[in-house]
Amino acid sequence: MTTHWAIDLGTSNTTICEDRSGRPHTVNLPDLAKLEPLTQTPVLPSCVCVMDRDGEDVLIGQEAVTYNWDGQAAGFARGFKRYLGMESGRAMARVGGRIFTAQDIASFFLREVIGKLEAQFGEDITDITIATPSGFYETYRAELQAIIRRVKHRSWWEHLWGRLRRKPTRIVFRTLDEPVAAALGYGVDVGRPTTLVAFDFGGGSMEAAVVRTHGARTVETGRAEVLAKQAVELGGDDVDRWILERFVPTAMHDWPEWEVALRWEAERVKLLASAGREGDFTFRNETYGKLDYNVLSELLAEKGLYSRMRELLDALLTELRTRHGVPAAGIDDVILEGGSTLLPEVRNVVGDVLGREKVREWLPFASVARGACIFAGGAHVEDFIYHDYGLRVLPDDEAEAEYELLIPGGTSFPTVDNFVTRYYAPGFDGQQHINLFICEIGRVAGRRVDWTERANGSRYFVPGTAGERAFCLCLNEADAGLPLNPPGKGASPRLRVTYSVDENRWLCVTVHDLHRKTDLRVEHPVVRLR
């Protein structure tokens, strides 16, 4: 069986997936990759350090970053992706008087990646898919194809003359649009026509594109129609700079040998704060301050990040409506890409503008590569619920709310009608209604929350920090409560509620009043799950 390999070649980081069993897996190259600290996804920094003028000795990924610890390595290059399509001849590094172009650097990077994969897995790579930005020109795809064929041709000749043991094999090379790949990775069925927004927030820029897939044609070609696109030059690198400005004296920024280490420390505490934890900004054994979720949120608001996001998304919707007559309600799904989507409140801002119920699961580092693998394998999408969904419980002592698990992530749908059954008693005598507040419990910084089972057999989650609370989104707070007539009395159960998920992802409830022996709701849709 052919192994499908997929590469999400990012401007800042690159992710690799392989599929040899029908289920894509993210690949870790331990010497070259780093584990993204929040989601634990292995990513390769998209960096190259050329060590000799012939380009034979090069370092890539984390090895290149470590070698360039002081930022002074002449052969160090990053950001080559953005130039590959339009300025492939742009100078990126110089070693021994020789200039290396963006095309050279991309070739070195992919050559080393493929070589390491073949060495680690002990097999030839003959099936490669690389996701490409929708707005890039065809020359970008052509450059990638030429690089892959050149790399594999050279690899074969090395095997031929070095080992004399194999015949040349045909290389299968594919490309597909990154938003399509991300949609597949998130579980969107692009086999049917759909309109989706891909919000990509990385290290250097923030982009949003409205993409329309065309059913079977999209599955066959990997190409989709871009209806609208907006971008601003603002990314995670800017957030790192804001953190430095907040904690470190300006004079320290001008020391070249300190710049890289300071940036690393800014990124470290940024990731901790985004995960709802507290981090001390420490440099040269001195602590300059603390950063937590709330402080970082305030800093981002102060610097205008959230305002810029809303402006970008509003401009996107205006373009979509003006050029194509498609209203915001015509958007089916919203997918998030890029590490900066993990920053505090970013997901909430996107949801506030485009609809929180439309925002898909959070796979900012793995979705594109995973989707590219699915595409290579025939674009079969497993449809299931990604996030956990629970009922918000409000304790009598007015402490912070806790959540009771109803629909766990990974649930296939449609479910049986009585997938979950719960009994609810009034909280006090005279209570006239009971609310069912359904909440989406997102992954806290990429990780599922820990649910604790109690004596009643149900599982609960109690957020411990502001960061954890921010990932618990109530989806139906404006819904009217279920009426109790006559009003509730005593501590015995009053309502029996059964929960199920229909074929369109709607969470439906059937509510039976035990006192009156009558149904108040029958398979009533409450919220749409993702």
Image (spheres, grey):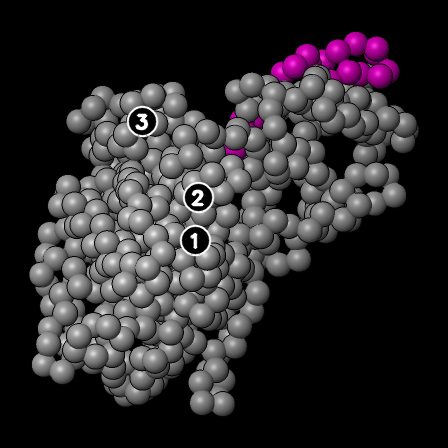
Instruction: Give the secondary structure at mark 2.
Output: loop
Please, is residue 395 above or below residue 253 in the view?
Answer: above
The answer to whether mark 1 and mark 2 are in CB contact below 8 A is yes
The answer to whether mark 3 and mark 2 are in CB contact below 8 A is no
What crowding class fits label 3: few (fewer than 14 Cα within 10 Å), some (14-19), or many (20 or more)? some
In this orientation, does residue 203 appear?
no
Residues 6 and 325: in front is 6
The Cα–Cα distance between marks 3 and 2, rounded to whole angstroms, is 19 Å
Residues 332 and 124: in front is 124
Residue at (79% x, 39% y) in the render: 458
**Rendering coords of residue 302 (x, y %):** 36, 61
Residues 461 and 360: in front is 360
> Is residue 524 highlighted in magenta?
yes
Q: Earlier in the sequence, mark 1 or mark 2?
A: 2
Q: Earlier in the sequence, mark 3 or mark 1?
A: 1
Label count reads 3
What crowding class fits label 1: few (fewer than 14 Cα within 10 Å), some (14-19), or many (20 or more)? few
What crowding class fits label 2: few (fewer than 14 Cα within 10 Å), some (14-19), or many (20 or more)? some
Q: In the rendered view, does 525 fall on the left or right side of 16? A: right
The Cα–Cα distance between marks 1 and 2, rounded to whole angstroms, is 9 Å
List the residue tagged with mark 1.
123
Residue 220's disc is 3
Amino acid bearing label 1:
Glu
In this orientation, does residue 403 appear?
yes
List the residue tagged with mark 2.
3
Instruction: Please give the range of residues in magenta.
Output: 511-530
The answer to whether mark 3 and mark 1 are in CB contact below 8 A is no
Instruction: Give the secondary structure at mark 1.
Output: loop
Q: Earlier in the sequence, mark 3 or mark 2?
A: 2
